[in-house]
Image (cartoon, rainbow, N blue to C red):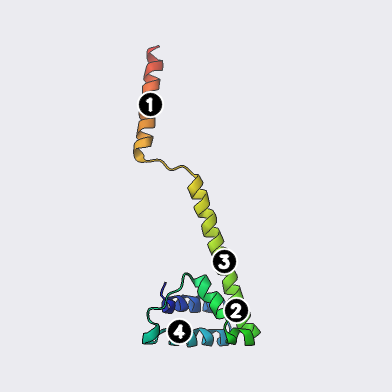
Amino acid sequence: MNVTEGLQQIRERLLDNGANAATLALVDAIAQRAALPAAQSATAASLLQLTRMLARSPAANNDITVYNDLLKLEEQLEEAARAYHERAAVEERIPTHSKKYYKDLKDKEKAKKEREGRS
């Protein structure tokens, strides 16, 4: 994921959470640096990774309110990731069959009923 886009998403989530102005200022400052031509190709693995990086910044370390805003967002992102992985695990356990499988099953049941009807 592009860092600039990720920071924009983080900013939107922080706004939704009612984050402090200092937290938004931190994200804006980092986004300005990420928008520089030298940093245009910067990527991050996830929003969670970006949030953790922000939480380790000097601004977050010096202001407990900023740190708490970022910690709250980190917890929300972790919960969303956990829920996603749980859904994926459930879907993985549920056998999925093709349309042909169900057609063949229906044909077998139909043939079985026809044999039973002749007996």
**Comes first in the chain, label 2 or label 1:** 2
Q: List the residue tagged with mark 3.
A: 78
At 37% across and 25% down in the image, what residue appears? 110
Q: Position of residue 90 (x, y in %)?
A: 52, 49
Judged from this view, the residue extending furthest toward the top is 119
Q: How far apart are marks 4 and 3 (CA)?
A: 22 Å
Question: The disc labelled 2 sits on which kind of residue?
Answer: Asp
Could you say which is closer to the camera, residue 119 or residue 90? Answer: 90
Q: How far apart are marks 2 and 4 (CA)?
A: 17 Å
- Residue 83: quadrant of the picture: bottom right
Q: Distance between the residues labelled 1 and 4?
A: 62 Å
Dot 4 crowding, Cα within 10 Å, few <14, some 14–19, many 20+: some
Q: Do the residues labelled 1 and 3 touch (CB within 8 Å)?
A: no
At 51% across and 75% down in the image, what residue appears? 50
Question: The disc labelled 1 sits on which kind of residue?
Answer: Lys
Q: Is mark 3 on a helix, strand or loop?
A: helix
Q: How many labels does the image show?
A: 4
Q: Is residue 104 left or right of residue 22?
A: left
Q: What element carries label 2?
A: helix
Question: The disc labelled 4 sits on which kind of residue?
Answer: Ala
**Comes first in the chain, label 4 or label 3:** 4
**Comes first in the chain, label 1 or label 3:** 3
Quadrant into which the C terminus falls: top left
Dot 1 crowding, Cα within 10 Å, few <14, some 14–19, many 20+: few
> Which label number is shown at residue 108?
1
Q: Do the residues labelled 2 and 4 touch (CB within 8 Å)?
A: no
Q: What element carries label 4?
A: helix
Q: List the residue tagged with mark 4.
A: 31
Q: Position of residue 64 (x, y in %)?
A: 65, 83
> Which label number is shown at residue 69?
2
At 52% across and 57% down in the image, what residue appears? 85
